[in-house]
Image (tube, coloured by chain):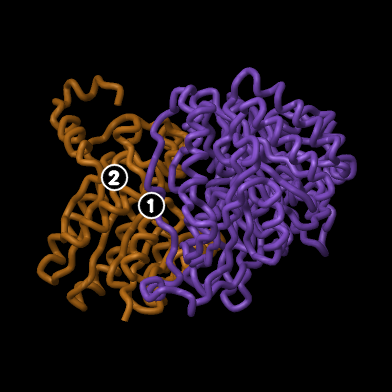
Chain colours: A purple, B orange
Amino acid sequence: MLKKISKIVSNWGNYPKVKSEIYTTSENMGLRDLLKNSDDQLIARGMGRCYGDSALSKNIVSTLAINKFVSFDKTEGVLTCEGGVTFDEVLKVVVPCGYFLPVSPGTKFVSVGGAIASDVHGKNHHIDGSFSSHVLSLKIVLANGNCVSCSREENSDLFLATCGGMGLTGIITEATFRLKKIESAYIRQKQIKARHLDELLDLFEKHKNATYSVAWVDCLATGNSFGRGILMLGEHARASMLTNKQKKNRLKVHSKPKLNIPFNFPSFVLNTWSIRLFNFFFYGKNLKKIMKGNVHYEGFFYPLDNIHNWNRMYGKPGFLQYQFVIPLAQKQVLREIMLLIAKNKKGSFLSVLKIFGQQKDLMSFPMEGYTLSLDFPNTPTIHKFLEELDQLVLKAGGRIYLTKDARMSAETFRASYPNSEEFKSIITKYNHSFKFQSEQSKRLSILN
Amino acid sequence: MTKLALILGGTSDISIALAKDLLVQGYSILLAGRNTEALNSIAADLEIRFDGSVRAIGFDATDYLNHRTFIEGLPSMPELTIAVFGYLGDQEKAQSDWQECERILDTNYKGAVSILNIVAKTYEDQKRGTIVGISSVAGERGRQSNYFYGSAKAGFTAYLSGLRNRLFKSGVNVLTVKPGFVDTKMTANMDLPGPLTATPEKVSKSIIKAIRKNKSTIYTLSIWRLIMYIIKTIPEFIFKRLKL
């Protein structure tokens, strides 16, 4: 049964907003009929946790009702589920059996289909690669309503174009992926304070064998403390490392969000001063240079999931998340960009720095290098500022994460995603009418 | 030994919500319905999510002749049987199309009576068990917008009340459920008033609670008891002029 509602939709950044028809169906047949009988351009949308316009279109197919688990091989650690199942649901099922997501972004409120279309990465990218490298096979419903299986062996071009393909190849209805074996739900965490950027980058280098590594950076600090931050490292805790209390329920599943932001904050709440204050406390809360301990995976991977609707802190105009990656050799450009942010006082609440390992996929975002992600309130001046940053990223041979983008130009996209022509030719083969289009794919002329 | 529940009408949203709640309570589930392919995928999903046992079984409410074989073929006799299936149908079509009309009457009334007769006999003999029938507020007074469905459900409600009367002395409880508007596949294309509409999860919770408390008849949302009281008390000479 097909359900249709009209609604103004925006994704996590609350910008842009588009008036859409949203179609929901729980049945594969309903989905296939919809595609067969409609000539409208449309895009699949799961949890809407991309930040910009990747999952926006006048016609949206919500995958949230296509959300069944299909099989779970507890011996091999292989899970098959439909595209609308969320990471939150996956964790609830697999953690008690001693498994974890092979790769997870900073929120568990993403759908499996969305994670593959965005080819999400996590704090372990330098060791384990992105999510798609753990995907064994997919089922995709194409523009003509046919359901096609694909993997690295079967219809491999479709498989490779779908991982990181932003939903432009079709609707991911089912995925089979490998899980990671764990002994406990706890992470052995180590936090190290770095007084400035050089120290932070040295620490990354020194701890490159850590399974999980990510750093929070104070983007407003200047002078001697420029680029100060906290490096967070983690390893899955073995059962023997747990405290007695933790041992009692060593495979404990996360709980529901505790806080909710019930309405949009006025947009003045987040300003340079409140961000400076936050950064001051965030840096200052770690009294010791090095802090160690066991934390539950929820706190380590998903600290913001505990605040429901935290995006409302940015008020009605929303915010822009800017995440770029530049090659390792371009360290000075990283510095240049961070200096520009500090100088212009374009502070970002959570600036997150990470070093990616190698990855050379068709459309995926990661490449070996530095990746920095920043949140900026959506103000009139920010767009021009980000265009300046675009130029620096391009000059360094880097690129911007499509899943977080709401504003880059088609030229920037074309110059930074070298395989976009090949990507388009694969889509031409499977969906020559280009039925799957998002506001983003049109803005970036990905299929033109 | 784990408790066993039989849910008739397996792919409906209310059935799935019930299966989830019963799994949490430690029941093993038999999900019965026509579309066994869909049932199998629902069963697999529930088993993975709740780490319990869910078995899909083919069942057709209007295939009366096979109802006995169906019950006898169950792996063991469930102690809880819930008849969820129903067919809303197309009232206007049914006014001139006997096939549609008959399907509404057959599914909602005859089908339910046929299968529950067999279950009732077993429960009566073993002197325990619980029967739940999902009837409807539509059965309380015939209205021009859905009186085929309504009259079939009225019959079903009367049947359940008689059955309850008969089985009381055997210690078997019969629960009649009148959910009111529910946001399900059956009503996907209807514009339902929010405050009067329950979710399938809410319906399921109300049923679980009523089973525990040995209730006879429940409305999922208590506002419906009031609404139906008013509808029932409107004098016929006014009622017949209304557009309900």
Chain ID at mark 2: B
The chain under label 1 reads B
Q: Taking B213 as reference, is B218 above or below it?
A: above
Badge 2 element = loop
- SS for tag 1? helix
**Whether labels 2 and 1 share one chain:** yes
Mark earlier in primary sequence (2, 1): 1
User: Residue beneath label 1, please?
Assistant: B14
Residue at the front extreme, as displayed: A224
Apparent side of residue A369 relative to residue B125 in the rendered image (left or right): right
Mark 2 lies on residue: B179
Total marks shown come to 2
A218 above or below B60?
above
Seen in the image, is B141 located left or right of residue B202? left
Q: Are marks 2 and 1 in contact (CB under 8 Å)?
A: yes
Which amino acid type is marked by label 1? Ile
Q: Nearer the viewer, residue B191 or A191?
A: A191
Name the spot of residue B82 as percent of width and height, x first.
Answer: 32, 61
Task: Quadrant for residue B89, please give it.
Answer: top left
Spatial separation of the CA atoms under disc 2 and disc 1: 10 Å
Seen at 41% across and 74% down, the residue is: A243
Please indicate, yes or no, whether residue B39 appears anywhere in the rendered image.
Answer: no
Q: What amino acid is found at the position of numbered circle 2 in the picture?
A: Pro
Pick whichever, A9 or A314, lies toward us: A314
